[in-house]
Amino acid sequence: MTPPHATARLAALCGLLLSSNACSPTKGVARTTPGDAPASDAAPAPSLSKDGGEDGDAARLDGAHLGDSAPPDAPPLEGADFLSEARAIYRVAACGGDDDPVPGRFDAKMVEAHCLDLKSKYDEYRTQWMNVAVPYIAALVPKGLPGEIVYPFGGGDLMTALATFPDAPVYTTVSLEVAGDVRKIDTVSMKRLKDELALNRLHLGKLFEKVHSRTINLDMESKSDLPGEVVFSMVALVLYGYEPVSLRYFRFLPSGTVHYLDAGEIALAEQDAATKKRRPVDVESDLFSDMELRFRKRGDKTAPVKVLRHVAFNLDDKHMKADPSLLRHLQAKGKVTAMTKAASHLLWSDDFSIIRGYLLDNMAWMISDSTGIPPRYANKAGFVQDTYGIMEWPAAFGPVDNKNAEDLRKLWKSNPQKDLPFRYGYPDGKSHGHMMITRRPDVTP
């Protein structure tokens, strides 16, 4: 029996789609994709590999559904694909594929001026952070880690996920921010677009400088005509040499299985919402909260396809209990590799004990700043923690419990001092960069 509050957003969507198969317990169940199978049927988790993850089950499955790089008999992807809109955002907002012409309806001079400014920020970020952090982290990440990356509180941060785990086939980020409706790129006015591009540059500049996004900025971006989660993800693709190959929206069924929304479902929902005079922001939240972006190396049609799934979800215990679909989806992945940073120290709180418990039960290895899992929980679950940089006392981002803060201070003091020449998330209270790895004792680089 489905819990009364399970899959709240899917239930809201079903209220709009009275005839939709998505609302049926026996119909509309989407094709099982990496990490979607019920736990009892889950295949062995794909692992990270230096050849781009081609030996992983997820990479093989994802690659098998691409038009020109897929086998001739490969079935099409389920759900509506918004690739054209994604590619427009990739070119116009993220300045990807700058050898491609600007789509006809856009002011090419305005876009090129935006890209000239943005590319200078890219160059600075590559020089100051990517060129330093990527090789440093690569030396720490062990071989053979699970290829499913789970990043709680990771909204808008495919950039750091790709920097940390460049060989992973599947990334799952979870945050409060909705993915947003990419179709707005087709109707936004040039005046509005100019303002939106300026806002993007401002927020990206702050992200590049601080190496983390403030929730208020992410929330503003998620409600704009250029949805921030999509724009930031496209920026990550540009920085690391990828291009989008599909963008779809989905919901979790109560089992945790992914259901992709098709064009008919979206049209019916919008028609019903218009009749009931629902606010556009509510319709967007119902329909365009969760997205799946598939991407591969730019210009290489034989390259393995990677998958980003962004899920808009409140990870506190109240919401995780009311709607267990996300937890079931994550559990079906089996062993995972985890990361978090700039997470307002929420994993310290007993209000977030379910997601913390999930990580401790299922992760093989985790990288974080001080907002990761505190020592008392990690040690009890059999993990050890390695420290990098300086952490004298956590900065006051979110609730900072004195007991956990003191345990972290002692952890850094007891471990050998290791220099960290870059920031990974928050600085400590005295602006020192720091980083922490939580691992099983036998898992080493």
Image (spheres, rainbow, N blue to C red):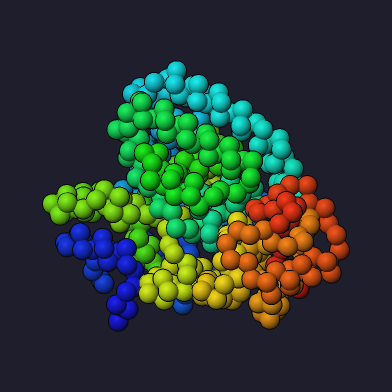
Q: Residue at x 69, y 61 (%)?
A: 394
Q: Residue at x 74, y 43 (%)?
A: 132
Q: Position of residue 231 (x, y in %)?
A: 47, 40
Q: Residue at x 25, y 71 (%)?
A: 26
Please tell me in which quadrant of the rendered image residue 83 appears.
top left
Please tell me in which quadrant of the rendered image residue 22 appears.
bottom left
Q: Position of residue 267 (x, y in %)?
A: 21, 49
Q: Nearer the viewer, residue 283 or 81?
A: 283
Q: Quadrant where the N terminus lies?
A: bottom left
Q: Is residue 246 left or right of residue 120?
A: left
Q: Is residue 110 left or right of residue 105?
A: right
Count of labels shown? 0
Q: Quadrant where the C terminus lies?
A: bottom right
Single out the residue that lies furthest toward the top.
109
Q: Position of residue 435 (x, y in %)?
A: 72, 58
Please say whether residue 255 is visible from this viewpoint: no
Please tell me in which quadrant of the rendered image residue 251 appears.
bottom left
Above-or-below relation of 243 to 189? below
Please say whether residue 282 is visible from this viewpoint: yes
Q: Nearer the viewer, residue 17 or 276?
A: 276
Q: Residue at x 26, y 48 (%)?
A: 280
Single out the residue that lies furthest toward the left.
275
Q: Nearer the viewer, residue 339 or 306?
A: 339
Q: Nearer the viewer, residue 192 or 272?
A: 192
Q: Position of residue 434 (x, y in %)?
A: 73, 56
